[in-house]
Amino acid sequence: MDEGNFYMSEFLPKPRWTSEQPRPEDAMAMAEMQRKIWIETYCKGNNIATDKEMLSYAISMTDDPERVAERARLIEASDHSDSTYYHIVRASGQPIGMVYGYKNDAHQELFALYVAKEFHRKGVATQLTTDLFRWFDPQRPVELGVVEDNIEAQQFYETLGFNPIPDSRVAFQGSEHVHEIRMIRQPQKEQA
């Protein structure tokens, strides 16, 4: 056995997860992961009206065939497009996190970032967003929307340089009870 390979395989820590571009056939597994995270994050029994709306939204992620098909189309498009970015992180072959971003001449958006609760504070979200920011144009701002009550997510985004946009509160998906705020990350100065 080559000593270098022995050292590499026996003594260096093995990655806990892998990061890759998803395939269209991953659409349902990603929807199931997102649904689970959504329910854990937003359906906490604090407000029956809010929980009902959020649960209905979560269920549609996997029970609406058109939403799953649309996700598969977005994944396929991201493989051949300069305007969409989709990435997934897996542990033991199962999706544990994902990020979706898009850009055009006028706008750059971190559209979705989800990480399974058991992988919070382990570097998964940081890896996903770091890779996304490499894809974005650093000379242009990046925006995102986040549910107003999701303070943990807002605090994470602030560590990435995002700040709330004043007076940006809007109804989430037409909801009467759930609101979203917009956040912005200003262009990054070039490092010398």
Image (cartoon, helix red, strand yellow):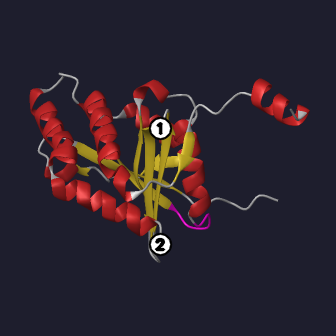
Q: Which class describes the residues within 10 Å of circle 1: few (<14), some (14-19), or many (20+)? A: few
Task: Kindly report the secondary structure that dominates the magenta region of the rendered protein.
Answer: loop
Residue 182 appears left or right of 128: left
The quarter of the picture where the N terminus appears is top right
The quarter of the picture where the C terminus appears is bottom right
| Disc number placed over residue 169 in the picture, else none | none
Disc 1 is placed on an element classified as loop
- Judging depth in this view, the residue of 190 and 33 nearest the camera is 33
Mark 2 or 1, nearer chain start: 2
Residue 164 appears left or right of 48: right
| Rendered position, 107 above or below 95 | below
Q: Residue reaching furthest right? A: 3
Q: Which residue position holds label 1? A: 93
Q: Which residue position holds label 2? A: 80
Counting from the top left corner in percent of width and height, residue 179 is at 23, 44
Counting from the top left corner in percent of width and height, residue 41 is at 31, 30
Q: Residue reaching furthest top? A: 45
Q: Which residues are magenta?
A: 137-141
Cα separation, mark 2 vs mark 1, equals: 24 Å
